[in-house]
């Protein structure tokens, strides 16, 4: 198990600057959140690779900038948009492979989408068939106001796809959906490959780890008992801290645990 930091935690810092900041802080595990189409250009990916090598970092997952449009582009009844998105995910899988990342995180469709659960799963697997050509798996993330924020949808996805339903589990998103994160982790653990971690309190649903009420000792013990070998990356919003150093202080404390 590895503890890391997502570049999303430093948003709106430019992606390459965020990655270098994380590298300079001594963090060896990172997720990259892409924020512009131009960041898929080979010259930009080379820039990220240079930073990765400079600080000897491990990139575990990437997050497409397409996420805000996935419901419209992928999980609708209009096929042409879907195949355009399929080409885009093929490119993201090439970028992920170049960076050494195994996973692409997907927000997916919204509750008002016209696809059935079976059609949704079919499109999810079509994305995976494309990205797995480059050895990369698409992970469905649990996200509030998306279909994946509904525990019944996650159960349906798991029932339809079995082991092929693979998830990125986000603690703050579980809180925003009104779910107990520990309950969801215990129920869906066999399908979880990657974690976005944060903390929360009565006053805030997104805090830096160890600043709220979440039992991180128990969380890590659970993952240890289950032999989890993936990454748990800190992903918070900028209102969760005042200085970026606070992110890395949280990272160090988590590693001590």
Image (spheres, grey):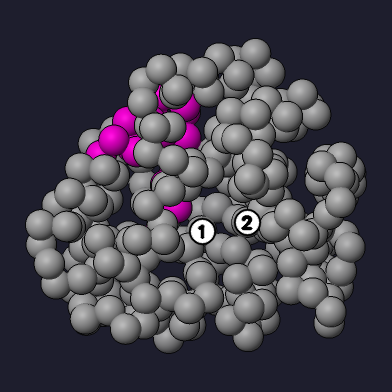
Is residue 211 shown to the viewer in this render? Answer: yes
Q: Quadrant of residue 91?
A: top left
Above or below for 213 versus 6: below
Residue at the spot 65% in from the left edge and 39% down from the top edge = 13
Foreground residue, 141 or 229? 141
Q: Position of residue 132 (x, y in %)?
A: 28, 41
Above or below for 62 versus 23: below
Residue under pointer 1: 168
Which SS class for mark 1?
strand
Which SS class for mark 2?
strand
Q: Quadrant of residue 12?
A: top right
Q: CA distance from mark 1 to mark 2?
A: 7 Å
Residue at the spot 60% in from the left edge and 35% down from the top edge = 14
In the image, the segment drawn in magenta is 90-106
- Horizontal arrangement in the rendering, residue 107 relative to residue 93 (left or right): right
Q: Position of residue 136 (x, y in %)?
A: 36, 40
Residue 115 in the magenta stretch? The answer is: no
- Horizontal arrangement in the rendering, residue 142 relative to residue 251 (left or right): left
Disc ID at residue 196: 2
């Amino acid at each position: 198990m590895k503890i890391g930091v997502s570049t999303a935690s430093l948003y709106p810092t430019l992606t390459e600057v965020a990655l270098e900041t994380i590298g300079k802080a001594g963090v060896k595990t990172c997720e990259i959140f892409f924020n512009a189409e131009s960041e898929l250009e080979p010259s930009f990916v080379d820039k990220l690779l240079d930073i990765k090598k400079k600080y000897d970092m491990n990139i575990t997952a990437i997050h497409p900038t397409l996420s805000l449009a996935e419901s419209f582009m992928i999980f609708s009844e209009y096929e042409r948009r879907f195949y355009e998105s399929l080409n885009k995910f093929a490119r993201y899988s090439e970028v992920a492979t170049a960076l050494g990342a195994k996973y692409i995180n997907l927000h997916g469709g919204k509750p008002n989408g016209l696809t059935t659960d079976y059609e949704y799963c079919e499109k999810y697997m079509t994305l995976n068939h494309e990205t797995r050509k480059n050895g990369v798996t698409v992970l469905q993330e649990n996200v509030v106001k998306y279909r994946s924020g509904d525990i019944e949808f996650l159960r349906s996805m798991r029932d339809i796809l079995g082991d092929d339903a693979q998830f990125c589990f986000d603690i703050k998103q579980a809180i925003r959906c009104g779910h107990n994160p520990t309950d969801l982790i215990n129920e869906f653990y066999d399908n979880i490959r990657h974690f976005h971690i944060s903390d929360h309190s009565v006053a805030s649903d997104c805090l830096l780890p160890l600043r709220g009420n979440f039992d991180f000792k128990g969380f890590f013990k659970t993952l240890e008992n289950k032999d989890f070998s993936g990454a748990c990356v800190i992903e918070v919003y900028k209102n969760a801290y005042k200085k970026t150093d606070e992110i890395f202080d949280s990272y160090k404390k988590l590693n001590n645990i």
